[in-house]
Image (spheres, rainbow, N blue to C red):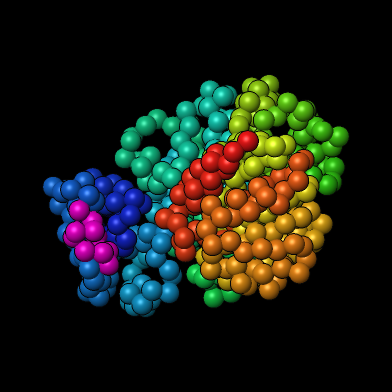
Amino acid sequence: MDLSDKKILVMGLARTGAACCRFLAGQGAAVVATDMRDEAALADVLAELGGSGIRFALGHHDKADFIEADMIVVSPGVPMDHPMLLQAKDAGREIISEIELASRFIDAPLVAITGTNGKTTTTTLCGELFRANGFETYVGGNIGEPLVELLESKAEIERVVVEISSFQMEWTNSFRPKVAALLNISEDHLDRYASYQDYIDAKLRIFENQTTEDFAVLNMDDPLVWQYSQALKARIFPFSRNYELDEGVFFKEDVIIYRHDGVEALFPTAGFRLKGVHNLENIMAALAAALLLGCCPEESFVCVRDFGALHHRMEFVREIREVSYYEDSKATNVGSVVKALESFENITLIAGGKDKGGSYAPLAPLVKERVRHLILIGEAAARMGEELGELTDTRKAASMEDAVRLAAELTDPGGTVLMSPACSSFDMFRDYEERAERYIAAVNGLTA
């Protein structure tokens, strides 16, 4: 793909947009970068990109920049129905995502992992599996490092693993992973999408350009995932906690079993550091992708066994007076909290935050069965209380610190206090990491 002298507009100057600007300018393109933030807010980015010949349109968007561009590269935070993008599309301009741009320059086999929950753990573990098997591997995408940064590095890479969000798939047209994994689908980002179906359709685009030479790794236990699998062109490679498979990865009697083209490999789970039913699914998906692309069972087993939980995903904080405290701040949707609740009994659940528009009804059976006390915080507390409050002892707290103190008072020895919000953090905190830090500090502040 020759970008020399092409007029390319980059919309959005967060980390992904800035990386695109650097790469495109390095390829000889005539780059215009636009962002609604002004020069003062973008001072660090402007200093980083200074001297690269990029023209900036800041504090506004200029229609002419969109209409006159040969190509527009959109950052993930920009919705598809932005008026400027709609006008550019009507004018016949090519609009692509950063993932689409980067993939056009990558030759190494690529694993793309999506789903409502578990993407980061699965992506990170899959990358570690490839590295443990001796492959030079790049791990990026929605996990933190834009894929286009691989192109800037000019590194010799043998495997690429990317976490893909629904936002990143919105402007793709030729993106084709050798292995694409869909972990699960549940309601999320309904503050961005007009309907649940629009969100599902964005996820499914990850398979759109695959052929029978590629693999689709799918969660057979998720009814929605399996429903949409029937229309895919790629070779289906399922994983399951509930069914024994002749072809795929499944769990039986504390052993993960991989079967492919007559070959079988066994992975006893007794010594695994990753705990919880959700992580069992993540492990099976990561193993499927890695083994399909050349990893050996022996090295892979050691890697999986020793792999620990990621920060802010069902992370153990401490035990006080025979009560265990866990932090799950990245559980920003209902589906993620379902998996967390399936992993414990006798739970005091701290939940709430900024409501994302989905239903809390899928939590109801587990709240009734496993949650002894429900403590609600943030903007969503009222609606969560309406949908779940009658199922168990339910209280409201004004702050995270108050919620932790109340949880400590209510929880009997042998119980578990779990902060798993089912909401985003922006009503009370800078991000999910600050929310986690405040919870951990409050727990550590409790006296034994």
- Res 394 seen here: yes
| Quadrant in the rendering for residue 116 | bottom right
Observer-nearest residue: 140 or 388? 388
Would you place residue 4 above or below residue 427 in this image? above
Left or right relative to 16: residue 240: right
Would you place residue 327 above or below residue 67 in this image? above
Residue at 71% of width from left, 52% of height from top? 410
Magenta region: 32-43
Q: Looking at the picture, how far across and down is residue 75, in whole percent?
A: 37, 59
| Quadrant in the rendering for residue 277 | top right
Observer-nearest residue: 200 or 27? 200
- The C terminus lies in quadrant: top right
Left or right relative to 224: residue 424: left
Q: How many marks?
A: 0
Q: Residue 40: within the magenta?
A: yes
Observer-nearest residue: 411 or 10? 411
Q: Looking at the picture, how far across and down is residue 292, in whole percent?
A: 65, 36
